[in-house]
Image (spheres, rainbow, N blue to C red):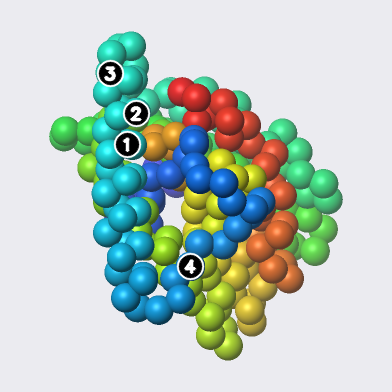
Amino acid sequence: MKKSTLVTFSVCMALTLASCGGKSEETKEEETVTADNPVEALENMANESQNAQDEAQKKIAERKSKGDTLALPYEELMKYLPESIDGYTKGEPDGASVNVPGSSYSTADCEYTNDKGERVKVTIVDYNQAYGMYAGLTAMWAFSIDTPEEKSQGVKLDNKVAGWEQFQKKSGDATLTLGVGYRFWVQVEASGQKDTEGVKKIAKMIDLDKLASL
């Protein structure tokens, strides 16, 4: 990630990040999270938002009681990036620790390319000291979108981590965004895809359980 784009990057993530992770109700693996009608969607928004905020505040309080109030150094975040992805060559990881008035966060990312010119990008952000960016956005994942160009919907990965998957049907670009442990933002982007199964597989290469436990 170019350092000059970090401020813009953080603002964009504030509009897309949601807080999910850890314990959840029993669901099938990679169950999509959608609403059948607008009224149900609005009810889901209210319920999911309140539940997420309650759980987030509980998790934050637990971390503060242990003295854990700082984001991990970006060098530590880099250790969670996949060492290798089959068929791809790993590039040079990048990262930064960002301090702004009232909050701070750290980020790490890496790009992987194959001989077809297709790319995968994995990004991990620690928002341990940027709680405002994390609050009240989980409800967005109660919706689904399906058009001739795009299919997007909420998803639960392995019954542990919730997020949002997006597939651009014409370009073959796929994106999976996950909120982990009410603290970490994980995104996997890939080109040349047929669906979102590839980005899910790559996300599972990250130690999400360990991140959620921090």
Residue 34, which numbered label? 4
Q: Secondary structure at mark 3?
A: helix
Q: Secondary structure at mark 4?
A: loop
Residue 98 in percent (x, y) is at 32, 34
Give residue 38's quadrant in the image. bottom left
Query: Within 10 angstroms of label 3, few (less than 14), some, or many (20 or more) residues?
Result: few
Which mark is first along the chain, 4 or 1? 4
Residue 82, which numbered label? none
Three-letter amino acid code at disc 3?
A: Lys
Three-letter amino acid code at disc 2?
A: Lys
Give residue 194's quadrant in the image. bottom right
Q: Is residue 27 left or right of residue 47?
A: right
Question: Residue 97 or 211: which is nearer the viewer?
Answer: 211
Which mark is first along the chain, 2 or 3? 2
Q: What is the C-alpha distance between the residues marked 1 and 4?
A: 22 Å
Query: Can you identify the residue that label 3 sits on?
Result: 64
